[in-house]
């Protein structure tokens, strides 16, 4: 590969030197060789084609962020403008015009025009290559097509000038030039990379976009204007090269302007995007801790640190609750509290805010077992004891840590200002609390794993804990009948289902299956729950959720594992059901026809970027009154009796026969039939089943 680049550079250098020699000789000697002008232009094009291959090979080996690419172009642009200044003060005599042809007046003019043209040509090639990379980020099928059309028009416009004198323009060239500008504008709308920039990167992008736009406008005037010394130098050197440089400069001008405007519009949401990315990143880190760290103190330290960082709290701490010698066994008897970890607060200050002798916010959380938000500490009756003391916090979020046995701890986060927390803060802290519960329970299980009998007993406990992570209540709607069940093959499993009530009367339904079984699958199942809770409300379509969830999951999942998922969004007012599938079992739809719904999709964690994004497809179904939809994992269809599987046909048959019953009865009938088929043997795989029955807009179906 290195030898090939050296060979290309050597060939380009030879052609440039040969052309320079011809220009010097032609200054005083009429060579009289037929077609010499065409030969000169072909030598130039061949030289720059070789240079493009070299630049392309070098750029392909160096990964860089979009902002760094813009910064590199900005530095190169400054160098080009400096070269213009140097040429203008060089004192060369310039050119004379004769019969639409430029004639250099001295040898320094020939040398400088060659030098300027070669440098500007390399600059144009590099800029085109970098802009191509930016346009193709997160590309769609039409993106590559539009870029190829522009590239073809760019080459065609350049080639159309081969036989045209420097000061003349043909009709064909004008038409091709106009089409090239049109497709340059079309490609300039491809700016998806701006969305994923941090606020700091957006500020750099804004500055680079502005200065690049101003710089390329100036460069376009210099190169495109026929009277400037730079334009005349490049025209003399090569008319096709001048057209190529001018078109690339116009493309860069439009793209820089669009980048500036787009970044300006995205800047107000930069902080929100940074925050969401920080939330997902923290969930990743915490999920890794669940599987990799079993030291209790380290877990608590990480949970409090992440809580403080993500919700920008002024302080936070985690309390562990112990009653009758057993953590989490909460009842009417006395309990003890131990602060396991704290950030930016002392034990004395905690005792002031939540004193053990006062029945306040701690007892409220222990009773209600759900997150509590205190917007104004001074006005909240649970902090009445603080009225005569110094206020240490203005607002609070208090979240319980609930395991299989009950409440095991409480996570506190506080801000100095009143009304400091929003709903997203509560959701994030709740997700952290769920993960912390899993992590703390795992830590306890490992500590007690010395004795095999106790390890087995604690694994049963983990099963109950995992059930707590599944929905405890089904969404309620008069025109929808829902029921669900999930049973692991071992004590814990990798199957997952969840519901989310979305804005505008929509319900999100997700069913997932982690490859493998047992504890490792359960860990990824808990991570999937955190990702769904963090991203679900911010995604307007199933495909958008799949793409973002895959980005969140791909960085942490083991290379030998993957997650299959099916996600449906139901509009409870219209009955419209939108479905996307990531390598999961097809959904069974029982309506006027009975069929499996199979939108395309690739399992999560197997790939990232365009390969996964392009593989995901959505399908829309308009449900009629009485329609039934069944989402499940392969534990249903792959249930075995000897060498025979339960299969899709048996599932379709039993569901069709039971379609007139309620969702619960349909679920029970499917489970009973599967159990009968397997002769009541234990499950070989995790089994999950969600049944949805639509009663129509008026709820009478």
Image (cartoon, rainbow, N blue to C red):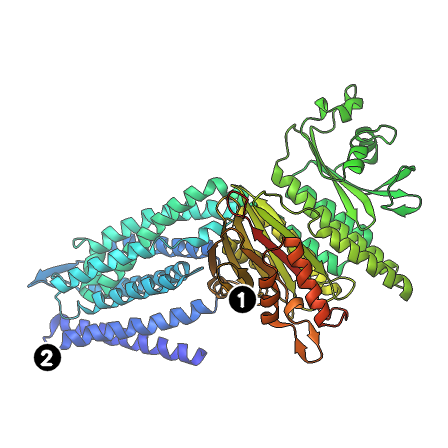
Task: Say whether residue 294 is visible.
Answer: no
Q: Which residue is mark 2?
A: 34
Q: Position of residue 52 (x, y in %)?
A: 34, 70
Q: Position of residue 552 (x, y in %)?
A: 59, 56
Q: Residue 503, relative to residue 70: is it above or below? A: above
Task: Say whether residue 239 is visible.
Answer: yes
Q: Is residue 44 left or right of residue 548?
A: left
Image disc number at residue 602: 1
Q: Residues within 10 Å of mark 1 (few under 14, many from 20)?
A: many
Separation of marks 2 and 1 at Cα, in angstroms? 61 Å
Q: Residues within 10 Å of mark 2 (few under 14, many from 20)?
A: few
Q: Is residue 29 left or right of residue 213?
A: left
Q: Secondary structure at mark 2?
A: loop
Q: Secondary structure at mark 1?
A: loop
For the point 61% across and 36% down, the residue is: 422
Which-is-in-front pick, marks 2 and 1? Answer: 1
The front one of 378 and 217 is 378
* Residue 428 falls in image quadrant: top right
Q: Residue 266, relative to residue 36: is it above or below? A: above
For the point 93% across and 44% down, the residue is: 324
Residue at the top extreme of this rendering: 388
The front one of 219 and 213 is 213
Q: Position of residue 196 (x, y in %)?
A: 50, 51
For the point 59% across and 54% down, the residue is: 692
For the point 79% across and 63% down, the residue is: 491
């Amino acid at each position: 590969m290195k030898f090939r680049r050296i060979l290309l550079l050597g060939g380009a250098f030879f052609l440039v030197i040969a052309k320079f020699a011809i220009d010097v000789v032609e200054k005083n000697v009429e060579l009289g060789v037929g077609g010499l002008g065409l030969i000169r232009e072909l030598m130039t094009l061949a030289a720059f084609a070789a240079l493009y291959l070299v630049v392309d090979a070098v750029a392909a080996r160096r990964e860089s962020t979009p902002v760094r690419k813009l910064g590199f172009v900005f530095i190169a642009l400054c160098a080009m403008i400096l070269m213009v200044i140097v040429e203008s003060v060089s004192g060369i005599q310039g050119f004379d015009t004769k019969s639409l042809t430029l004639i250099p007046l001295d040898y320094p003019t020939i040398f400088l025009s060659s030098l300027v043209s070669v440098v500007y040509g390399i600059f144009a090639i590099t800029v085109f290559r970098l802009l191509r990379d930016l346009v193709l980020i997160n590309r769609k099928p039409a993106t590559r097509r539009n870029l190829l059309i522009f590239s073809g028009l760019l080459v065609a416009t350049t080639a159309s000038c081969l036989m045209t004198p420097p000061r003349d323009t043909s009709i064909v060239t004008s038409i091709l030039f106009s089409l090239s500008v049109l497709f340059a504008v079309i490609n300039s709308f491809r700016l998806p990379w701006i969305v994923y920039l941090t606020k700091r990167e957006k500020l750099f992008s804004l500055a680079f976009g502005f200065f690049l736009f101003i710089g390329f406008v100036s460069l376009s005037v210099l190169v495109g204007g026929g009277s400037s010394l730079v334009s005349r130098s490049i025209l003399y050197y090569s008319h096709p090269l001048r057209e190529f440089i001018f078109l690339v400069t116009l493309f860069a001008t439009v793209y820089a302007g669009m980048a500036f405007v787009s970044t300006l519009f995205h800047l107000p949401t930069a902080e929100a995007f940074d925050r969401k990315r920080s939330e997902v990143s923290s969930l990743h880190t915490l999920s890794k801790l669940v599987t990799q760290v079993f030291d209790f103190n380290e877990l608590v330290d990480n949970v409090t640190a992440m809580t403080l960082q993500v919700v920008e709290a002024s302080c936070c701490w985690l309390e562990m609750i112990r009653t009758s010698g057993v953590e989490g066994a909460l009842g009417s008897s006395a309990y003890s509290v131990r602060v396991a970890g704290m950030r930016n607060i002392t034990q004395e200050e905690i005792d002031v805010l939540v004193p053990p002798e006062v029945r306040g916010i701690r007892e409220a959380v222990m009773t209600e077992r759900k997150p509590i938000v205190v917007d104004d500490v001074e006005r909240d009756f649970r902090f009445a004891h603080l009225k005569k003391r110094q206020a240490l916090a203005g607002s609070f979020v208090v979240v319980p840590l609930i395991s299989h046995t009950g409440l095991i701890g409480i996570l506190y986060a506080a801000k100095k200002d009143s009304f400091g927390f929003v709903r997203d803060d509560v959701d994030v802290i709740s997700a952290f609390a769920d993960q912390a519960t899993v992590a703390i329970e795992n830590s306890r299980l490992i500590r007690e794993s010395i004795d095999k009998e106790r390890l087995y007993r604690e694994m049963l406990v983990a099963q109950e804990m995992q059930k707590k992570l599944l929905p405890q209540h089904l969404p309620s709607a008069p025109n929808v009948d829902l029921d669900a069940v999930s049973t692991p093959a071992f004590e814990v499993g990798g199957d997952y289902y969840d519901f989310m009530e979305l804005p505008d009367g929509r319900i999100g339904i997700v069913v997932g299956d982690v490859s493998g079984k047992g504890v490792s699958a359960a860990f990824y199942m808990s991570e999937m729950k955190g990702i769904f809770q963090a991203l679900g409300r911010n995604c307007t379509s199933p495909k958008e959720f799949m793409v973002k969830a895959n980005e969140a999951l791909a960085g942490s999942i083991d290379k030998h594992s993957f997650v299959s998922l099916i996600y449906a969004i139901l509009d409870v007012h219209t009955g419209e059901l939108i479905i996307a599938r990531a390598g999961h079992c097809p959904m069974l739809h029982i309506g006027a026809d009975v069929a499996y719904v199979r939108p395309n999709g690739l399992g999560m964690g197997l790939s990232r970027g365009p390969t996964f994004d392009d593989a995901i497809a959505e399908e829309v179904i308009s449900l009629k009154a009485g329609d039934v939809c069944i989402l499940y994992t392969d534990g249903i269809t792959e249930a075995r009796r000897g060498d025979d599987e339960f299969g899709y046909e048996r599932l379709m048959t039993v569901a069709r026969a039971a379609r007139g019953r309620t969702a619960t009865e349909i679920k029970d009938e499917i489970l009973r039939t599967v159990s009968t088929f397997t002769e009541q043997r234990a499950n070989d795989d995790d089994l999950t089943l969600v049944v949805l029955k639509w009663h129509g807009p008026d709820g009478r179906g």
